[in-house]
Image (spheres, helix red, strand yellow):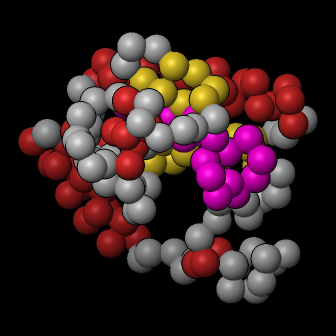
Amino acid sequence: MSTDCLFCRIARGDLPAHKVHEDDHILAFLDLHPIRPGHTLVIPKDHHVWFEDLPQDLAARVTTCAQHLARAMKRLYGVERVALFFTGIHVPHAHAHVVPMHHVHDVSSAAYLADGPEGYAIPPQLPAEEMVRVAAELRVGLERS
């Protein structure tokens, strides 16, 4: 664990959190600035900056916890969808966001909101040649990882 990382401090119990789940490897707690009530963060207790650096068993543990949370959120909030995403924007410690989606734009980017929050603008589609190129690059990248 890092001594100054916000999420490491929460995992150690140095800072308070509204805990939802905890085991020896992960901690799930409510986001202080939720997109919607119930917005929960799932973190590994060990310090990993990027989600792609998580050992596979730890990533699976985070995802499994998120799946259980999603099922509970669907029952509790009566929502059809629950979003799961890793961003790592504000805290450099791998963390998953689990968000009950009450509205189609609860987790949308500005690219989808050109017509305002009640509209839905589909971003331009990439040309077919570029889609072929990007897919090929990703396939090669996967072979190297």
Specify the quadrant that holds the N terminus.
Answer: top left
State the residue lying farthest toward the left.
144
Q: Residue at x 40, y 70 (%)?
A: 128
- Depth order, front residue of 114/89: 89
The location of residue 105, given as percent across then percent down, is 74, 64
Name the side, left or right, on which 133 lies relative to 145: right
Q: Residue furthest right?
A: 78
Q: How many marks?
A: 0
Look at 42% across and 62% down and name the residue there.
90
In the rendering, at what x and y percent does residue 80 appear? 82, 39
Residue 122: image quadrant is bottom right
User: Could you tell whether 23 is left or right of 117 in the image?
Assistant: left
> Bounds of the magenta span?
29-44
Query: Above or below — where is 54 with respect to 4?
Result: above
Note whether residue 63 is visible: no
61 lies left or right of 38: left
Q: Please provide percent x and percent y for residue 67.
A: 60, 25
The picture quadrant where one finds residue 13 is top left
Residue sitting at x 57%, y 38%: 17
Pick the quarter of the image with the C terminus: top left
Question: Up-down: is 9 above or below 133?
Answer: above
Figure check: 33 above or below 20: below
At a point 46% along the width and 14% down the height, the residue shown is 23
Image-quadrant location for residue 121 = bottom right
Choose between 145 and 86: the one closer to the eye. 86
Front residue of 3 and 64: 3
